[in-house]
Amino acid sequence: MKKRCVAIVLSAGQGKRMGTSIQKQYIELCGKPIICYCLEAFEKSEIIDDVIMVAGAGQEDYVTEEIVNKYYYKISTSNVETINNERESTLKSSSFSFREKKRIPFYDDVASIGGVNTMVADNSGHIAPSELIDAGDWFPEATAAIRHYGDSMIEYPSGSILALKRVEDNRLIIWGRNYSIETTEFRITKRLQDGGEDYILAYSSNESTYSDGRLIHSPIRIPKETIRHIDLVLGCVTKEYSNGPIKIIKQ
């Protein structure tokens, strides 16, 4: 089993010798805080699996919003820690608090037509994930994640990542909630309703119509016998622009 390599970035120092009103690691250099160059180096490294950033007491919100989210680093919010002590104690504290992250499969290789993801599994029903990602503390119950495309579900911007939880027993489906369904023909993300003994009805939240009043995104009647699996949508992770803050939308 391959051992994981974790980088611990100590960012709790006050930098008193600098004589500045702001801690030295947050002083801007060429348009961004100095600490960013350190984080970028670790993220580009092929041998670093994870990064823990340790900030000073009371700075967790600042580091999360103004450093991690603003510059779109992949550090989970659960990896931003705070400490009151000096460097030696800071290192010991962050080392002891490190825990293995929950990695979930992320399926990015999907295409969408009218809100229907046309990526279909092979005959065995298995699809290889694009990568394994850390769900962090945003969606601790997530069992997988997919890329969402299209405008049929207005609560999920196209290009966002949906966090999913596998439904092991279809009797536990809550009608009116959003689910991702994979059948033998397609994968869709829709709001589900009971369609009787043999069918499930899948509706879009985007109720836009053509000029003649017909729905652009018509309901889909799915035979239960074609369903491979169903996943509850826990929420999504999205960004409005490439270097903007990460937004978490929970269902």
Image (cartoon, rainbow, N blue to C red):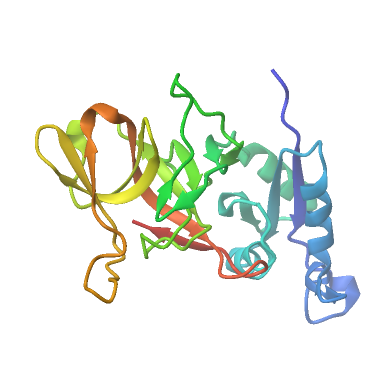
Instruction: Compare residues 29 and 196 and report the one nearer the observer.
Output: 196
> On the rendered structure, is 55 left or right of 213?
right
Direction left: furthest residue = 196
Q: Is residue 183 above or below residue 164?
A: above
Residue pictured at 29% horizontal, 72% vertical: 210
The x and y percentages for residue 40 are: 80, 55
Query: How many numbered marks have been drawn onto this rendered protein structure?
Result: 0
Q: In this view, does 21 lie above or below 10?
A: below
Let me know if residue 158 appears in the view. Answer: yes
> On the rendered structure, is 60 left or right of 160?
right
Residue pictured at 87% horizontal, 75% vertical: 30
Q: In this view, does 204 lie above or below 185?
A: below
Direction front: furthest residue = 212
The x and y percentages for residue 23 are: 79, 72
Residue pictured at 25% horizontal, 65% vertical: 215
Q: Quadrant of the C terminus?
A: bottom left
Instruction: Compare residues 150 and 237 and report the one nearer the observer.
Output: 150
> On the rendered structure, is 219 left or right of 95?
left
Q: State which quadrant residue 181 falls in.
A: top left
Q: Quadrant of the N terminus?
A: top right
The x and y percentages for residue 108 are: 56, 44
Direction bottom: furthest residue = 21
Residue pictured at 22% horizontal, 31% vertical: 224
Instruction: Compare residues 73 and 80 and report the one nearer the observer.
Output: 73
The x and y percentages for residue 125 are: 43, 24
